[in-house]
Image (cartoon, rainbow, N blue to C red):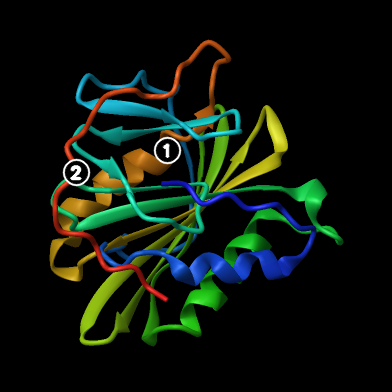
């Protein structure tokens, strides 16, 4: 279930980024690039739309993905049905910070925080920017180790053109051996982030939660 936080106008807020759950790979390397894409696609029939509580932001998860049943530091966090991937989303309003800060600076703080909590933290993909009609998506990917396991960490910040003060920062985790299969799924999730229409209800679809609980990083 969602853990409630009172937003503070402080960069210390970003320190909770390292409390996510380990289970997901990242995108392969490449030089910084800006890609122009077509109009946003309507949600596919095999996805579920989730409106983040107390916000005007929605995103699509594949059917079968389920919300973390435990407390978590994100505004929302979902696991894949086989627990091999997960996505956590933080929402920030730049007006709540004591000093001016941009999207890339917030993303860099998230990366720095997690790097202090992992071993052999290495960049796999440098910053890549995708310019979509309604948003700008900036992504970087790192590999890291926790205990005896290796993971890929995909960091993304989404800037909404209709609301430039609102930023969505995602941390997605997957296994390196499954990255080629996981990457396009995780990319679709982040690129589905949008300002939700006021009439869009939060998903009420019941999804059976597997008995095994994913590991939560500390």
Mark 2 and mark 1: Cα distance apart in space:
25 Å
For the point 81% across and 47% down, the residue is 95
Q: Is residue 46 above or below residue 177?
A: above
Q: Is residue 157 above or below residue 109?
A: above
Name the spot of residue 104 as percent of width and height, x first. Answer: 63, 60
Q: Mark 2 and 1 residues: CB-CB less than 8 Å, in contact?
A: no
For the point 48% across and 81% down, the residue is 115
Name the spot of residue 151 as percent of width and height, x first. Answer: 27, 72
In-image side of 114 versus 144 (left or right): right
Q: Is residue 29 visible?
A: no
Residue to which mark 1 is pinned: 191
Q: Nearer the viewer, mark 2 or mark 1?
A: 2
Name the spot of residue 206 as percent of width and height, x first. Answer: 24, 28
Residue to which mark 2 is pinned: 209
Q: Is residue 153 above or below residue 78?
A: below
Q: Earlier in the sequence, mark 2 or mark 1?
A: 1
User: Mark 1: which secondary structure?
Assistant: helix
Check the picture and name the quadrant holding the C terminus.
bottom left
Residue 64: quadrant of the picture = top left
User: Mark 2: which secondary structure?
Assistant: loop
Name the spot of residue 161 as percent of width and height, x first. Answer: 65, 32
Q: Is residue 127 visible?
A: yes
Please give the label number shown on residue 19: none
Q: Residues within 10 Å of mark 2 (few under 14, many from 20)?
A: some
Q: Residues within 10 Å of mark 1 (few under 14, many from 20)?
A: some
In-image side of 130 versus 142 (left or right): right
Q: How many marks?
A: 2
Residue 15: quadrant of the picture = bottom right
Q: Is residue 193 above or below residue 87?
A: above
Q: Nearer the viewer, residue 204 or 178?
A: 204
């Amino acid at each position: 279930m969602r853990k409630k936080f009172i937003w503070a106008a402080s960069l210390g807020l970003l320190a909770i980024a390292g409390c996510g759950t380990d289970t997901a790979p990242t995108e392969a390397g490449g030089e910084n690039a800006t890609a122009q894409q077509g109009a946003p696609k309507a949600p596919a029939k095999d996805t579920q739309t989730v409106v983040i509580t107390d916000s005007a932001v929605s995103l699509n998860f594949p059917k079968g993905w389920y919300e973390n049943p435990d407390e978590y530091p994100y505004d929302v966090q979902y696991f894949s049905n086989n627990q091999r991937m997960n996505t956590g989303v933080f929402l920030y309003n730049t007006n709540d910070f004591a000093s001016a800060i941009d999207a890339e600076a917030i993303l860099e703080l998230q990366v720095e925080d997690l790097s202090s909590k992992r071993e052999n933290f290495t960049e796999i993909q440098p910053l890549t920017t995708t310019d979509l009609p309604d948003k700008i998506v900036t992504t970087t990917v790192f590999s890291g180790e926790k205990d005896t396991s290796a993971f890929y960490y995909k960091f993304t910040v989404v800037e909404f053109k209709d609301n430039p003060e609102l930023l969505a920062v995602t941390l997605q985790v997957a296994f390196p051996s499954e990255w080629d299969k996981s990457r396009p799924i995780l990319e679709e999730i982040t690129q589905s982030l949008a300002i939700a229409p006021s009439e869009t209800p939060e998903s009420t679809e019941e999804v059976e939660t597997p008995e095994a609980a994913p590991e939560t990083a500390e």
